[in-house]
Image (cartoon, grey):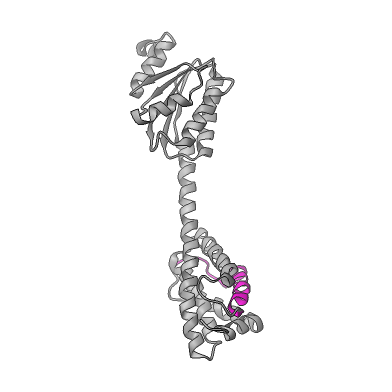
Amino acid sequence: MGEGTFTEAARALRERHAAVLEKWLGLFVSSPLRLLGPRNTSEVQSLAEGVAGGLAEGLADPTCAPGSACLRDAEKQLAFVGGVLSAAGATSFDVMAFVLGLREALRVEVSQVAEREALSSLFDWLAAVTLEGACASRDDSVRLRHQSSLERGTPVVQLTEEIPAVMLVGEPERSVLESIFSRLLFAAVRVGARVVVIDGSGLACQADERVLDVLGLFARHGSVAGKVSLVMSGIGDDAEGKWREAMPASVETWWEERLDRAIQRALGLMGLSIQRALRA
């Protein structure tokens, strides 16, 4: 694009800011693309103000083109807007209506055919940037809900009054693992446990460094190391070596293929059997 490609559009955003903004938000609210999301201009007014300010500077730059450095601030604003709209429940159609509303509001301010055509091309890029922000926000929201579900739903149970156990599942992030093992530690300390069962059969990646690191921290805790025997179950051959390396020498560990055998082992270490445990 040559020098001054978006001269009229930049001037309109600077000198007719209020009028362009009003036109833009009106087009957004009335757009046939919209499905859900904000119902009036007040809900997106501040978002539009930020975008208009950043875009006015970018369009005034002679080097303005999709992906150029002068549009960096405007692109960040639009990606942020996409995330905000997505978090508010807006669909991709609503996001497109927001961006294309600005394009149409600027097109009517431009008399030169070449600049109007260039605006259409530029806004293809800006719409993609905004949608990427919306998708990233949606992905983050799904990930956070998933991790929250893992944290709340990972079972930390009492096999007997004195034997706590945890069944690790999915792909927990480090913060989730720390919360889970904190619950397990609390359960062990509360009952004065001498044996704890840790089952990893439900993990998507048993050799995940985050799992190994938090597991090692748990085993080295002052309330565990040298005081509690750990019975591990469901660890595949490809990961068992790494789990063993994560264990400090001061912790007695036992390894079983299945959870039922781990439970029997834990009961045996306590001088119990399944029948005696059930009677208790």
Residue at coordinates 53% horizontally, 91% vertically from top-left?
A: 111
Q: Position of residue 228 (x, y in %)?
A: 51, 16
Figure quadrant of the C terminus: top left
Q: Residue furthest right?
A: 15
* Count of numbered circles on the image: 0
Residue 25 vertical position relative to residue 218 in the rendered view, above or below: below
- In the figure, 177 relative to 87: above or below? above
Q: Is residue 16 above or below residue 55?
A: below
Residue 179 horizontal side relative to residue 49, left or right: left
Residue found at the far top of this picture: 271
Q: Considering depth in this image, is 102 or 25 the residue closer to the camera?
A: 102
Give the camera-side residue of 67 and 164. Answer: 67
Q: Please, what is the dominant secondary structure of the magenta stretch?
A: helix
Task: Pinpoint residue 261: horizontal percent, then vertical percent.
Answer: 34, 19
Q: Residue at x 41, y 35 (%)?
A: 169
Work out whether residue 280 can be spotted.
no
Q: Quadrant of residue 3?
A: bottom right
Q: Residue at x 37, y 28 (%)?
A: 235
Side of 30 relative to 22 (left or right): left
Where does residue 26 sit, x and y in percent of width and height?
Answer: 54, 78
Q: Which residues are magenta?
A: 36-60
Q: Is residue 134 magenta?
A: no
Is residue 2 shown to the viewer in this render? yes
- Asked if the magenta segment contains residue 39, the reply would be yes
User: Residue at the spot x=34%, y=28% of the render?
Assistant: 237
Q: Position of residue 54 (x, y in %)?
A: 61, 72
Q: Is residue 114 above or below residue 232?
A: below
